[in-house]
Image (spheres, rainbow, N blue to C red):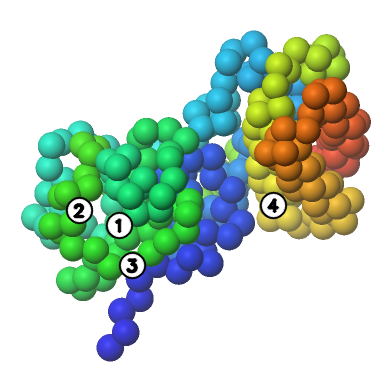
Amino acid sequence: MIMKGFDLNLLDGIYGLSCVENYFLYFLKEQGYSYIPFFFDSYLSFETIIKEFVENKAEYSSFYRMTRLQKLAAEYGLIDITSKQDKKVRLADDRHFEYAAIQVKPSFIREKYERNLWREDHFILLKKVEQTLFYLNDIPRDTNTITYEEIDQIYDGKFLKFSIKKAIDKDLEKIFRKGFKMSLKSGELKETEVLIQKISNITLARDIIGILRISRKRVYLYLNYLGVKEKKLEKYLDYLDMIYNKIEYIRLRKADSNQKYKEILNQVYEKDKGFFDIVKKYTNIF
């Protein structure tokens, strides 16, 4: 008998901002729970994103201007999240355990994947199928079986458990749509060009584009969920992917002595205004 562990393909199209957010969305997706409605609050203006990085010293690995989706779901009473800090994870004694995200030692990631973490508090997702344990790592994508003994060796003091309380009903759908319309009010741009000139390095520019494209992909998926199909939005998302890769290429080649990234971000700013205008147009139909 083949036991079903994790399906790496289910990580496609999730667009989480952290490993825990990715695992939460994976969990919902695997359970057949519609997770896209949680993207209703994901729009931020380009100006707001830049300001978070330039003035508030935000970092990609800990960008909290967009509320974490698992927190959002818990606030609306849709899921339960149990968070515990303990020297031992004690999952072997938990008869009701199905899914849990555990914080792992940085040395585990360095030794297993030969790479450093963006942040020290990295988690993996665990799943129990009958008496077999599976783990899932989001970046790099990896899954396999694991034993309780191996978990004890890599565990680093914190674990989370998810459980679904109820589905999204029609009343919540209305609240989410209203919240989406409210989020678009942050789309008024006043200081974007000035803020772009304050971006001090190309790594910062790359991370700003990274957050922008996650925001825009979530908005696109949410509109799709509401029945909106718009090719121009798809083309813009492809454009953002291209820009992100272009800036990363320039960064790795150390070929930005003239700060070309500022010119690139001004071009993105112009195209993003077009994205906002299209999205705004559709808010009148729902």
**Count of numbered circles in the view:** 4
Say whether disc 2 or disc 4 marks the residue closer to the N-terminus.
2
State the image quarter where residue 150 is shown.
bottom left
Residue pictured at 76% horizontal, 27% vertical: 46
Residue 49, can we see it?
no
**Helix or strand or loop: what does disc 4 sit on?**
helix
- Say what amino acid the circle numbered 3 marks: Asn
Q: Distance between the residues labelled 2 and 4?
A: 36 Å
Say whether disc 2 or disc 3 marks the residue closer to the N-terminus.
3
Residue at image mark 2: 151
Q: Distance between the residues labelled 2 and 1?
A: 10 Å
- Would you call the spot at circle 2 few (<14 residues within 10 Å), some (14-19), or many (20 or more)? some
Please tell me the numbered disc located at residue 62. none
Q: Is residue 138 left or right of residue 4?
A: right
**Helix or strand or loop: what does disc 3 sit on?**
strand
Q: Position of residue 22 (x, y in %)?
A: 48, 49
- Which-is-in-front pick, marks 2 and 4? 2
Residue at image mark 4: 221
Residue pictured at 32% horizontal, 60% vertical: 135
Residue at image mark 1: 126
Residue at image mark 3: 144
- Say what amino acid the circle numbered 2 marks: Ile
233 to 141, vertically: above or below? above
Say whether disc 1 or disc 3 marks the residue closer to the N-terminus.
1
